[in-house]
Amino acid sequence: MKAKSGFNLRDICGTTILVAEGVENIDFNNIISMNETSAYLWRAIQNKQDFTVKDLADLLVKDYDVDEATALADSEKLSGQWLKAGIITK
């Protein structure tokens, strides 16, 4: 998978929001709020050529107190939400 370009995290009144910027995202009308963990993962993959669900899970296991099975399940769910929102591609 790959993060689409032109989406940047911004802190707005204490809430982390993914903001569409640039001409390529002019028609993007979703507002995506991210919790601390999903924002951490977004920052980690935002400029990578590609990433997998396993890459996301590995980051969770490394930096959070979570077992690998839970991290994989959570990463699968999150990547599905990101795909549905149109902020990553397969």
Image: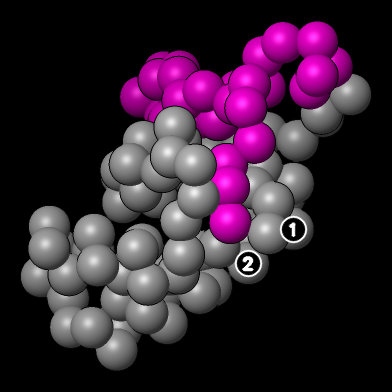
> Residue at 51% across / 29% down in the picture?
17
> Which amino acid type is shown beneath numbered disc 1?
Lys
> Residue at 66% across / 42% down in the picture?
87
Asked if the residues shown at circle 1 and circle 2 are in contact, with their CB atoms under 8 angstroms apart, the answer is yes
Magenta-drawn stretch contains 16: yes
- Left or right of 38 in this view: 30: right
Which of the numbered marks, if any, corresponds to residue 39? none
Nearest the viewer among 25 and 89 is 89
Mark 2 sits on what residue?
Answer: 80
Q: Position of residue 38 (x, y in %)?
A: 39, 50
Which residue of the protein is positioned furthest toward the bottom in this rendering?
69
Q: Is residue 88 above or below residue 58?
A: above
Q: Residue 47's image quarter?
A: top left
Magenta-drawn stretch contains 25: yes
Mark 1 sits on what residue?
Answer: 84
- Left or right of 19 in this view: 41: left
